[in-house]
Amino acid sequence: MAEQKPQADVIRLTLPNQTEYLGVARLTVSGIANRMGFSYEEIEDIKLAVGEACTNAVIHAYKGKEEVGFIHIECQVFPDRLCIEVSDQGIGFASELIPEQLTPIFAGRDLDDLDEGGLGLYLIHTLMDEVVIRSEAGVAVSMTKYVRRDGVAGDDWTNSETEV
Amino acid sequence: MDLFLKTTSQDTEHRVVLGGDIDAHTGPEVKETLMSLANEPGTRRLLIDLEAVEYMDSTGIGIFIAVMKACKQKECAFEVQKLSPRVERLFRITGLYEHIAIRKGESE
């Protein structure tokens, strides 16, 4: 769990790891982003990134485990940014696998060589300003989006900084 | 919002209107519908209308790749039309835009 900054409002949501709750996760985050003053496009990008992180958790985290798991979403609302952490207590993954999954896909490849999966992490890195992924007891994806105001340059999605 | 899915068929041509949310929850139904149309004997054309799609994530991209592969094997034409700005953005970011056949202009 990320250390809380005193100036942040914190909103936590815990959902069963079932796909039927993915929409609830997206709606919650979009409501928070909306009241922070993000643009429509930015809100949709945040929704998509959170949707991808939650989908990864629901699909992969508790694979082969008997018990019902949970997906935790923590939103930290700062004056200038929204930090969202999506975490689970699932099986985790080898962190050396991550770079493989971050290749921009499809360009110059034949249809037969395209994979049907593995796009989630790439999209998260592309859509958010800062991304940190930890895999210890389960997986935690922390992602940050800055509110763009005059004089505060938010970077373009083609130019996002990533940290793995 | 939930999934909206409607198929209209004319001989060997199928048009599927997709709407609402396409994610890991609704994806299996979308994939099953499109794959069974693609694999139906004699299918010559599959046209997917995306105008009413409100949310789509990588689940949708994966479905389209699978269906495009199936259509290629069956020599069936696969096209999408009426992309919303959000869907177009997703197609462009992932690079699927370069691979997918997009029908421009008004439909029949």
Image (tube, coloured by chain):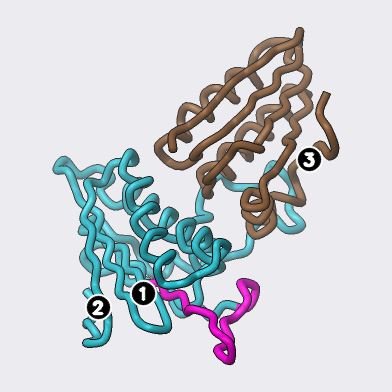
The location of residue B18, given as percent across then percent down, is 59, 31
Query: Residue drawn 34% across and 49% down?
Result: A60
Q: Amino acid at mark 2?
A: Ala
Numbered label attached to residue A2: 2
Q: Mark 1 — residue?
A: A83
Numbered label attached to residue B26: none
- Location of the N terminus of chain A (image quadrant): bottom left
Label pair 1/2, CB-CB below 8 angstroms: yes
In the image, is B51 to the left or to the right of A139? right
Same chain for the residues under marks 1 and 3 in the image = no
Provide the secondary structure element on which disc 3 rests.
strand
Q: Amino acid at mark 1?
A: Cys
The hue of chain A in the figure is cyan
- Chain holding disc 1: A
Question: Over which residues does the magenta segment extend?
Answer: A143-159
Q: Amino acid at mark 3?
A: Ile
> Which one is nearer the viewer's eye here, A13 or B34?
A13
Label pair 3/2, CB-CB below 8 angstroms: no
- Chain holding disc 2: A
**Colour brown belongs to chain:** B
- Location of the C terminus of chain A (image quadrant): bottom left
The location of residue B7, given as percent across then percent down, is 62, 18
How far is mark 3 from mark 2, CA to CA?
44 Å
Query: Residue drawn 42% across and 54% down?
Result: A51
Furthest toward the left, the residue is A67
Q: Mark 3 — residue?
A: B102
The location of residue B77, given as percent across then percent down, is 78, 27
> Which one is nearer the viewer's eye here, A36 or A130?
A36
Against B40, is A144 above or below?
A: below
